[in-house]
Amino acid sequence: MRFLLSLCLALTACKKSPPPVPATPQPPVTRPSGLITQVLVPGDGDAAKKGDKIQVHFVGRILDGGVFDSSRTRNAPFSFWVGEGQVSPGWDEGLLGMKEGETRQLIVPPDLGYGQEAKTNIPANSTLVFEIELLDVR
């Protein structure tokens, strides 16, 4: 009997814990402005509100998938004041309420991005896709 109890305890102790389950992205949300937001990885820190200075890492793509900018490639997080017009209207709207540690995708229609103005590596009237990780809220 002792042997069976010891064997059972030994087998239980040797069992490896299952690996952590990756977060399941939330469903996309289309806002009245046409902006589409999707939480890819939830965060648990402070939420960004108008007037906060935030620091993010981002990758920006044109809808067809071509990368036009990335703070990750430069290894240089980007900081700005939310809701103060320092970034595109799509970012100002789409990052409100985002929590520290969260990764969010924004699909920005042309009128909330650069509109009819072409930029380096971004044709006029482009829909832009950003994957943004919120690092810090102040």
Image (spheres, rainbow, N blue to C red):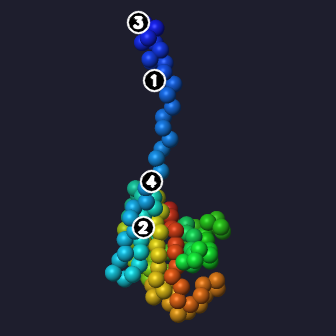
Name the quarter where the N terminus is drawn: top left
Is 132 or 9 nearer to us in this picture? 9
Q: Residue at x 64, y 65 (%)?
A: 75
Q: Tags 3 and 1 in contact by the CB under 8 Å rule?
A: no
Q: Tags 4 and 2 in contact by the CB under 8 Å rule?
A: no
Residue picked out by circle 4: 23
Element marked by disc 4: loop
Q: Residue at x 39, y 81 (%)?
A: 34
- Count of numbered badges drawn on the protein: 4
| Amino acid type, residue under disc 1 in the picture | Thr
Crowdedness of circle 4 by 10 Å Cα count: few (<14), some, many (20+)? few
Task: Give the spatial CA distance, label 4 vs label 1.
Answer: 27 Å
Q: Nearer the viewer, mark 3 or mark 4?
A: 3
Q: Position of residue 66 (x, y in %)?
A: 62, 75
Taking the view exactly as shown, the residue that stands out farthest to the top is: 1
Crowdedness of circle 1 by 10 Å Cα count: few (<14), some, many (20+)? few
Residue picked out by circle 1: 12
Q: Image height check: is 110 above or below 4?
A: below
Element marked by disc 2: strand
Q: Tags 1 and 2 in contact by the CB under 8 Å rule?
A: no
Q: Position of residue 3 (x, y in %)?
A: 46, 8
Picture disc at residue 1: 3
Sequence-wise, the earlier of marks 3 and 1 is: 3
Task: Give the spatial CA distance, label 2 vs label 3.
Answer: 56 Å
| Amino acid type, residue under disc 2 in the picture | Gln
Name the quarter where the C terminus is drawn: bottom left
Picture disc at residue 38: 2
Sequence-wise, the earlier of marks 2 and 3 is: 3
Sequence-wise, the earlier of marks 3 and 4 is: 3
Task: Give the spatial CA distance, label 3 vs label 1.
Answer: 17 Å
